[in-house]
Amino acid sequence: MLTILQGTADLAYIMGFALAGTILAFLWAPLLTRLLFKFHLVKGPKTELVTLGSHAYKANTPIMGGLLVVITVAVITYFFNWSRNFTWVPIGVMLFSALLGGIDDLLSIYGSERQSRKVGHIMRLIRVHSEWKMRLWYLITLPWTAFKRMSVWFGSQTKRGVFVHEKLILQFIAGSFTAWWIYTKLGPAWHYIYLPFDYSINAGWLIVPIIVFIVMFTANAVNIADGMDGLAGGMLLITFSALTLMSWINGFGELAILNATTVGAIATYTYFNIKPARFMMGDVGSLGLGALLAVNAMAIGEVATLFFFGFMFYIEALSVVIQVASKYAFGRRVFKMAPLHHHFELKGWSEEKTVMRFWVVHFMFVVFGFWLALH
């Protein structure tokens, strides 16, 4: 198990930051609420779910409520827990990912519709365009066009906002920055994947693409799971609570404080996000906190157990992958609707029932992951 003795902190002191995060977020939550309503930052529910009735009220619920967590965590960390060794990169990755999500949120509301050419259209242009230079250009860029079109399969049907392929490129940058930090700055001990029961694998340079993939997949997994009032907030609360204790046990004091601060801020966000939500997280919160979750877990050496710490987030993301693969490979759907929480809603579960059951299942697997991490 990866441990480091420098920067350890008293557990009571760490819990104080959880309280600080809660209080500060509560203090400025009314201001954020007024701003969100003032600028009418409302995207509305998925059109496929409006007919259920339970989602109709969401048409007037503002998004970008995740700013409550992102800004609170960043401010407290900067003034009281800034560490060149352990906190500046997680905060930087969180803010970069949150900025990407915020731009997407704003463009999805205020932006104009955007179009991307289909592969078939490009193939026709390659054959019939009057200029040979343009035919050559379309041929050279055909793989890029195919990538852009394939990425649409995993995104929403909206024509506004940041395209999926653009998100993936920027998330790749965030993941690469994280990989550079862990691989070159934290030392050779972080080149290992530490398994339960005192086993380990020396991944060497392969840890770099692993880290990049984990950051990208986790950020999107949290984003995908943010589809019901209280769902993502409650599960993030459970996950970051476990990461707080795991960071403290492993001796990463600065990261324990960072995770505790996040717990406090998320607790306040979830208070306001319980149905009927005063505001929703938006991409600014889900992408930022998803990236922070991945970075903090890997920084304390919990690569192998991260799947359990983020269990329901990953299950939600995998349900989308399975749905898309089945649809395009076999022409049929596995779920009534993806991600998974909407499948159960369409089966007749109420939003509250779905959310609470997901919380319970997530809690059980997080506890299992915590147990594994202790061995």
Image (spheres, rainbow, N blue to C red):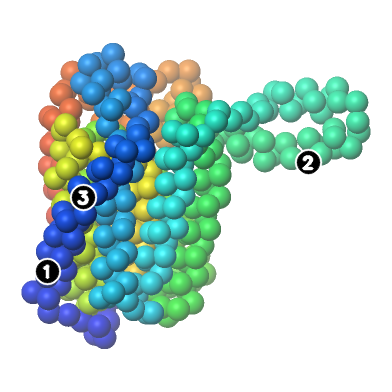
Residue named by callout 3: 29
Q: Distance of mark 3 from mark 1, alpha carbons?
A: 21 Å
Which mark sits nearer the N-terminus, 2 or 1?
Answer: 1
- State the quadrant of the N terminus: bottom left
Which mark sits nearer the N-terminus, 2 or 3?
Answer: 3
Mark 1: secondary structure: helix
The residue most toward the top is: 51
Q: Amino acid at mark 2?
A: Ile
Badge 3 vs badge 1, beta-carbon distance below 8 Å: no
Mark 3: secondary structure: helix
Q: Amino acid at mark 1?
A: Met
Mark 2: secondary structure: helix
Residue 169 rendering spot, x and y as whole percentages: 55, 50
Left/right of residue 252 with respect to residue 271 in the rendered view: right
Of tags 2 and 3, the one toward the viewer is 3
Q: Is residue 231 above or below residue 254?
A: above
Q: Amino acid at mark 3?
A: Ala
- The residue that appears at 20% across and 47% down in the rendered structure is 30
Q: Is residue 297 above or below residue 130?
A: below
Q: Distance of mark 2 from mark 3, alpha carbons?
A: 50 Å
Left/right of residue 73 with respect to residue 94 in the rendered view: left
Left/right of residue 106 with respect to residue 339 in the rendered view: right
Residue 144 rendering spot, x and y as whole percentages: 67, 40
- The residue that appears at 27% across and 62% down in the rendered structure is 73
Q: Which mark is residue 15?
A: 1
Residue named by callout 2: 140
